[in-house]
Image (cartoon, rainbow, N blue to C red):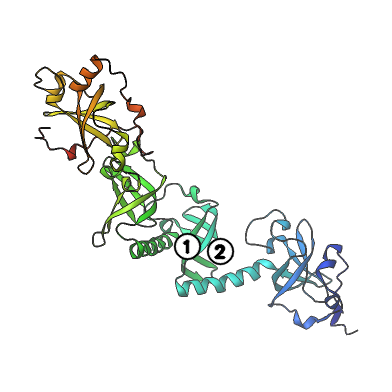
C-alpha cells in the first residue's frame, strides 16, 4: 500500500460505526490533501479532558488542544464539540517526536468570521453578537472571534452599568477591522439607531388614520401615555383613554402593558401620532336606552357640581344632569345646599338623548316617589357598565352640557 495512503478506520470508536457507510470505510485518502495552512472538514472521534482527536482523512488523526478549540474560555472540550460531530479545522502543522498532526478549530472559525465581518463592513449590514465579558472601557462580544464595543458606542448617552449587558445578544455594526492587529471594533449604538430608523419608516409607511394598531405603553405622564408602535411613539391623551373620566393615566395603564389603540390623527411633518383607547371599547351611549328607562329610579354618585345643577354618575362613562330646579321641592340657590361630590343618591330619569349623550335626572321626583313607597331604585353597582376598562373610575361628560344649561 502506498505510504501516502491509508484506509479510514471507522471501527476504532463504536459510536461512529453508524455514521460511516461501507463505501466510506473502504475509501483511501491522499495525505497530500491535508497540509499546513489548509482548512478541512473532519470528524470528532475522541474527546479527552484537554484535547480532541479529529479524523481529517490523513495518515493519523489530528489533535486539537483545548486552547485551540475556541476563542472563548472553556473548562472542557465537550463544551464546544460533541463526539461524531463534523467540524472545520485549520491545519497548523506537526508536533512531537511522532509528528502528530496539529489542528485548530479556533483558527478555522476565526478565518470564516473574518470573511463574514469584512462582508458586513462593506455592506453596512447589522449582525447580532453575544456579550461575553465586561472590561474597562466597553464590552467584549462574540462574533466568531473576540470583538470590542467601546463604551461610547454601547448606547446613546452615558451607560452607568455596563454589567446589565453581560450575556445578552445585541445588534452591532462593524466600524473598524484590522486583521494584522486582530482588531474588531463594533457599535451597538449605530446599529440600534439604524434599526429604529427602519422601524419608523415601516410604521409611517403602513399606519393610517382610523386603523387599530398594537402598541406597548412606554411611559406615563399627567396628561397621557406614550405608546410605542414599533419604533414610533404615539400620544394617547388622557381624554381619549376612557368613556369615563380618568384621574391619572396610572389608574388605567402601566408601563410595559400591551394595548390596542386607534389612530386618530397623523402629522408626518411634526412626527406626531394621536391615539385613542376608548374608541376600541364599546361606547356605553350606543346602548344607553337598553339599560336606562325614563320614569325609572336609579342609584348614582355625585361627581361634579356646577352653578346650574349636579352631575350624577350612573356608570363609568355615563352621567346625567340634575338641574338645580330638580334638586328639591324647596328653592335652591346653590347645588351644594342639597348634595356634595361623592354623595350616593337615588334619581329619576326624566329624559334620555343618546345622540347628544345627555340624560336629564331629578332628585326631587325620586325623593317623592320613595316617600310614597317606591322601593326599587337600581343601585349604582348594578347599572351594568359596558367597558371593562376603568369601571372603578369616576366619570362625567361635562363637555356635553353647556355651562348656562337650563335643563
Quadrant location, the N terminus: bottom right
Instruction: Identify which residue, 60 or 407, lies in the foreground.
Output: 407
**How far across and how far down the image is residue 137, in percent?**
46, 54
Tell me if residue 26 can be seen.
yes
Quadrant location, the C terminus: top left
Image disc number at residue 172: 1
Mark 1 or 2, nearer chain start:
2
Tell me where residue 387 sits by quadrant.
top left
**How far across and how far down the image is residue 261, in percent?**
35, 50
Label 2, secondary structure: give it: loop
Asked if residue 253 is positioned above or below residue 138 in the image, the reply reads above
How far is the residue under mark 1 from the one under mark 2? Answer: 10 Å
Asked if residue 28 is positioned above or below residue 236 in the image, the reply reads below
Image disc number at residue 143: 2
Q: Horizontal placement of 266 versus 104: left or right?
A: left
- Marks 1,2: beta carbons within 8 A: yes
**How far across and how far down the image is residue 96, in percent?**
80, 69
Tell me where residue 189 sits by quadrant.
bottom left
**How far across and how far down the image is residue 200, in percent?**
36, 61
- Residue, x 31% and y 48% (percent of image)? 279
- Residue, x 46% and y 74% (percent of image)? 123
Q: Horizontal placement of 249 versus 82: left or right?
A: left
Q: Horizontal placement of 213 versus 95: left or right?
A: left
Label 1, secondary structure: give it: strand
Image disc number at residue 264: none
Q: Horizontal placement of 147 versus 328: left or right?
A: right
Q: How many marks?
A: 2
How many C-alpha atoms fall within 10 Å of the one at disc 2: few (<14), some, or many (≥20)? many
How many C-alpha atoms fall within 10 Å of the one at disc 1: few (<14), some, or many (≥20)? many
Instruction: Identify which residue, 206 or 254, lies in the foreground.
Output: 206
Amino acid at each position: 500500500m502506498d505510504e501516502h495512503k491509508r484506509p479510514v478506520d471507522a471501527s476504532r470508536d463504536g459510536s461512529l460505526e453508524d455514521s460511516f457507510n461501507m463505501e466510506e470505510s473502504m475509501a483511501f485518502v491522499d495525505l497530500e490533501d491535508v497540509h499546513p495552512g489548509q482548512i478541512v472538514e473532519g470528524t470528532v472521534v475522541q474527546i479527552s479532558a484537554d484535547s480532541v482527536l479529529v479524523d481529517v482523512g490523513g495518515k493519523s488523526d489530528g489533535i486539537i488542544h483545548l486552547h485551540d478549540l475556541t476563542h472563548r474560555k472553556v473548562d472542557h472540550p465537550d463544551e464546544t464539540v460533541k463526539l461524531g460531530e463534523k467540524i472545520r479545522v485549520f491545519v497548523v502543522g506537526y508536533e512531537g517526536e511522532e509528528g502528530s498532526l496539529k489542528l485548530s478549530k479556533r483558527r478555522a472559525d476565526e478565518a470564516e468570521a473574518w470573511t463574514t465581518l469584512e462582508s458586513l463592513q462593506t455592506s453596512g449590514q447589522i449582525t447580532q453578537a453575544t456579550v461575553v465579558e465586561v472590561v474597562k472601557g466597553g464590552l467584549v462580544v462574540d462574533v466568531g472571534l473576540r470583538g470590542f464595543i467601546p463604551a461610547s458606542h454601547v448606547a446613546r448617552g452615558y451607560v452607568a452599568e455596563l454589567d446589565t449587558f453581560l450575556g445578552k445578544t445585541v445588534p452591532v455594526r462593524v466600524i473598524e477591522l484590522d486583521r494584522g492587529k486582530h482588531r474588531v471594533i463594533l457599535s451597538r449604538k449605530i446599529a440600534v439607531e439604524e434599526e429604529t430608523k427602519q422601524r419608523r419608516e415601516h410604521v409611517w409607511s403602513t399606519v393610517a388614520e382610523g386603523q387599530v394598531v398594537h402598541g406597548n405603553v412606554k411611559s406615563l405622564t399627567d396628561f397621557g401615555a406614550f405608546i410605542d408602535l414599533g419604533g414610533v411613539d404615539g400620544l394617547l391623551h388622557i381624554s381619549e383613554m376612557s368613556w369615563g373620566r380618568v384621574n391619572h393615566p396610572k389608574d388605567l395603564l402601566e408601563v410595559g402593558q400591551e394595548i390596542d389603540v386607534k389612530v386618530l390623527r397623523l402629522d408626518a411633518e411634526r412626527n406626531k401620532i394621536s391615539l385613542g383607547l376608548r374608541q376600541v371599547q364599546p361606547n356605553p351611549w350606543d346602548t344607553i336606552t337598553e339599560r336606562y328607562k325614563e320614569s325609572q329610579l336609579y342609584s348614582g354618585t355625585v361627581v361634579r357640581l356646577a352653578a346650574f345643577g349636579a352631575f350624577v354618575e350612573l356608570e363609568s362613562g355615563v352621567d346625567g344632569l340634575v338641574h338645580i330646579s330638580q334638586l328639591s321641592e324647596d328653592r335652591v340657590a346653590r347645588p351644594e345646599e342639597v348634595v356634595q361630590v361623592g354623595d350616593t343618591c337615588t334619581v329619576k330619569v326624566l329624559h334620555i338623548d343618546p345622540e347628544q349623550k345627555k340624560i336629564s335626572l331629578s332628585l326631587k321626583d325620586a325623593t317623592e316617589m320613595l316617600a310614597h313607597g317606591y322601593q326599587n331604585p337600581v343601585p349604582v353597582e348594578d347599572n351594568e357598565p359596558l367597558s371593562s376598562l376603568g369601571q372603578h373610575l369616576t366619570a362625567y361628560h361635562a363637555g356635553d352640557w353647556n355651562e348656562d344649561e337650563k335643563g
